[in-house]
Image: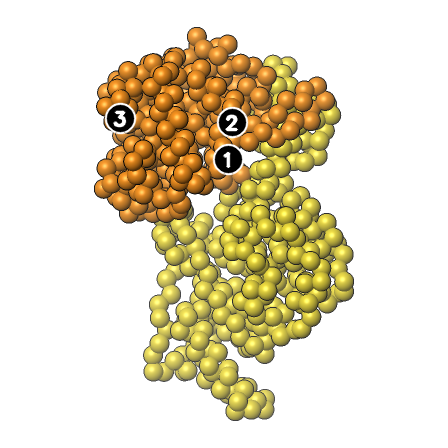
């Protein structure tokens, strides 16, 4: 299943209909080879923009924030039906989203209604619910599902991140998306190194990698003064995140897409950063298909 | 002892300020009211207290950014009151957050109305004016929530059709569905221009950094030119998941308000005008009232009974 997914190269996650314009970037030398977007559930809200991107020759990935991939609250069948339709309409090769609470109880909706994602509880009971949620989505959508560890400012539960997501992926046979900043956020929030549980992660299931800007807030805990990571796509990519990127790429043999999440970043910085990402991928990635596609394009 | 109880505790920690403060002091004691076993309690000991405080504060900011869009003038005015920003932040609480998302703005607005009763204002007049503006915006939030809920439950919203015919004066009229009406101290449009320097999702980020000054509030509310502010919620974009609801608005002179109460489906406009004439209304007033009714009919806020 994962082997058959197309290799998309190095792309960018952007807001449709706002700057920087996805089509302009795609048409620029050194621009993204695919576009990811965090769209609304209704495909008619985005389809015109998507058609423009696809006409420019770039495939798209739909990456929303309204699916509960964890917890006790089931996804609405209507939202899942519309999601399936959306995926089909835009031709997203897989369906990835953060594994977190986007809504509470029966209030289906976007994570913004809760401010942003509420992270899952990292324990066995939570893992059991998450398996149920992922299977619920897999049964509804026409493409492979990929789950993403969300950004966290705090952690509840003692199960290591990669143990939780490794178990989830094996139990549901789903794919994984790893966001480098989110991994850094977990390390800062938990005081644990994600790579300490690397053996627990089925690395061959990681199909997509995200890299994005963030900022550090000063912590004032009486025991630790360690910073708190805040996911902020409009900011520069932090050194800790680049280091995580360097360290993780050699471990992931099946990565099909590396996405720079850069909503709100100016075009010049996007292009410079994409260039840097491509170079690191060529030097470090264990994904032969990904490296090959970059070398062919060069 | 259950996972559901852990979920309840997690949600409460994010939206119950006093629970969170207690938790930061002593996590075990703070969670004593939840049926959690030792292992479940232990999961919460992983939380960094400074991080959950930061998380809750960022969450509140983002939620207020959304809610502010439904109460722009109220938010601006309240921001200028002593502790006004703090008051707005405190209303992102369990009462607001436990209800269905479609109802959150109305629950928030209802709580704000109660809190305004004990706020410190320059005068009773100022309090009345600000409360009236809140009532108008709360009315819109209510009709919006009602309509949205109906659509999500699969009910077709009652569709108003253009009300225009030769004998429009002689037919009994009633209010259309999803109408709210309130008397506000000045034109809503003018107040919005005066008090809201940013549109939509930009307003709360602006106000939270730069609250409206008390002097600008005083100046804005200095003169009264009361208006009957009437709104009708309608679906501007149908969706099985997220229908978009907008409001059509009309502003009439305050004198229209008593007449509006008689729009109950039993009287025609001609009958209401006749009563006014009997009561001694001038030709100019009668013409103004007739024009107002015509405006409400064409904008589908009134319909024939």
Determine the chain carrying the residue at label 2: A
Q: Quadrant of residue A279?
A: top left
**Chain A color in figure:** orange
Q: Nearer the viewer, residue A206 or B242?
A: A206
Residue matched to label 2: A238
- The nearer-to-camera label among 2 and 3 is 3
Q: Secondary structure at mark 3?
A: loop
Q: CA distance from mark 2 to mark 3?
A: 27 Å
Q: Quadrant of residue A219?
A: top right
Q: Is residue A81 left or right of residue B8?
A: left
- Vertical placement of residue B144 versus B181, above or below: above
Kindly identify which numbered label has been placed on residue A235: 1
Kindly identify which numbered label has been placed on residue A183: none
Chain depicted in yellow: B
The way the protein has been coloured in the rendering is: by chain
Q: Nearer the viewer, residue B147 or A163?
A: A163
Quadrant of the rendering where the C terminus of chain B is positioned: bottom left
- Residue B160 in percent (x, y) is at 38, 65
**Mark earlier in primary sequence (2, 3):** 2
Residue at the spot x=45%, y=11% of the render? A198
């Amino acid at each position: 299943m994962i082997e058959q997914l197309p290799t998309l190269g190095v792309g960018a996650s952007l807001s449709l209909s706002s700057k920087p314009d996805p089509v302009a970037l795609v048409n620029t030398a050194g621009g993204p080879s695919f576009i990811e977007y965090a769209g609304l559930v209704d495909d008619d809200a985005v389809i015109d923009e998507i058609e423009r991107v696809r006409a420019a020759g770039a495939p798209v990935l739909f990456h929303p924030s309204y699916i509960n991939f964890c917890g006790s609250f089931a996804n609405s069948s209507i939202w899942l039906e519309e999601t399936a339709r959306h995926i089909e309409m835009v031709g997203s090769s897989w369906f990835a989203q953060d594994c977190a609470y986007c809504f509470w109880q029966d209030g289906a909706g976007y994570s913004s209604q809760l401010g942003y994602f509420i992270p899952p509880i990292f324990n066995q009971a939570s893992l059991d619910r998450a398996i149920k949620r992922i299977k619920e989505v897999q049964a509804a959508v026409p493409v492979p599902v990929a789950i993403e560890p969300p950004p966290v400012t705090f952690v509840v539960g003692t199960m290591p991140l990669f143990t939780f997501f490794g178990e989830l992926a094996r139990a549901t046979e789903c794919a994984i998306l790893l966001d480098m900043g989110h991994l850094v956020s977990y390390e800062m929030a938990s005081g644990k190194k994600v790579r300490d549980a690397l053996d627990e992660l089925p690395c061959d299931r990681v199909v997509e990698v995200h890299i994005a800007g963030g900022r550090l807030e000063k912590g004032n805990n009486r025991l630790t003064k360690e910073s708190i990571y805040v996911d902020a796509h409009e900011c520069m990519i932090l050194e800790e995140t680049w280091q995580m990127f360097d360290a993780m790429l050699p471990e992931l043999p099946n990565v099909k897409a590396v996405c720079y999440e850069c909503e709100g970043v100016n075009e010049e910085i996007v292009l410079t950063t994409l260039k840097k990402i491509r170079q690191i991928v060529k030097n470090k990635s264990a994904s032969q298909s990904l490296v090959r596609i970059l070398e062919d394009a060069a | 002892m259950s996972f559901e109880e852990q979920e309840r505790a997690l949600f409460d920690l994010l939206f119950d300020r006093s629970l969170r403060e207690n938790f930061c002091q002593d996590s075990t004691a703070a969670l004593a009211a939840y049926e959690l076993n030792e292992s479940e309690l232990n999961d919460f000991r992983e939380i960094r207290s400074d991080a959950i405080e930061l998380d809750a504060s960022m969450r509140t900011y983002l939620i207020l950014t959304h809610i502010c869009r439904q109460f722009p003038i109220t938010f601006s005015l309240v921001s200028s009151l002593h502790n006004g920003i703090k008051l707005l932040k405190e209303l992102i609480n369990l009462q607001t957050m436990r209800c269905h998302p479609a109802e959150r703005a109305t629950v928030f607005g209802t709580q704000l109305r109660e809190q305004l009763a004990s706020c410190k204002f320059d005068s009773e007049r100022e309090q009345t004016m600000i409360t009236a503006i809140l009532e108008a915006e709360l009315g819109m939030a209510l009709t919006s929530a009602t309509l949205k809920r109906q659509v999500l439950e699969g009910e077709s919203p009652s569709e108003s059709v253009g009300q225009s015919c030769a004998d429009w004066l002689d037919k009994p009229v009633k209010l259309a569905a999803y109408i709210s009406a309130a008397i506000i101290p000045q034109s809503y449009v003018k107040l919005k221009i005066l008090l809201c320097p940013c549109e939509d999702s930009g307003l709360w980020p602006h106000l939270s950094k730069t609250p409206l000054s008390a002097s600008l509030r005083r100046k804005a509310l200095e003169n009264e030119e009361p208006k009957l502010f009437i709104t009708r919620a309608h679906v501007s974009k149908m969706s099985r998941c997220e229908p978009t609801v907008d409001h059509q608005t009309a502003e009439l002179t305050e004198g229209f308000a008593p007449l509006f109460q008689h729009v109950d489906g039993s009287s025609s406009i001609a009958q209401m005008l006749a009563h006014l004439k009997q009561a001694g209304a001038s030709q100019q007033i009668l013409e103004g009232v007739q024009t107002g009714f015509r405006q409400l009919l064409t904008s589908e806020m009134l319909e024939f009974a």
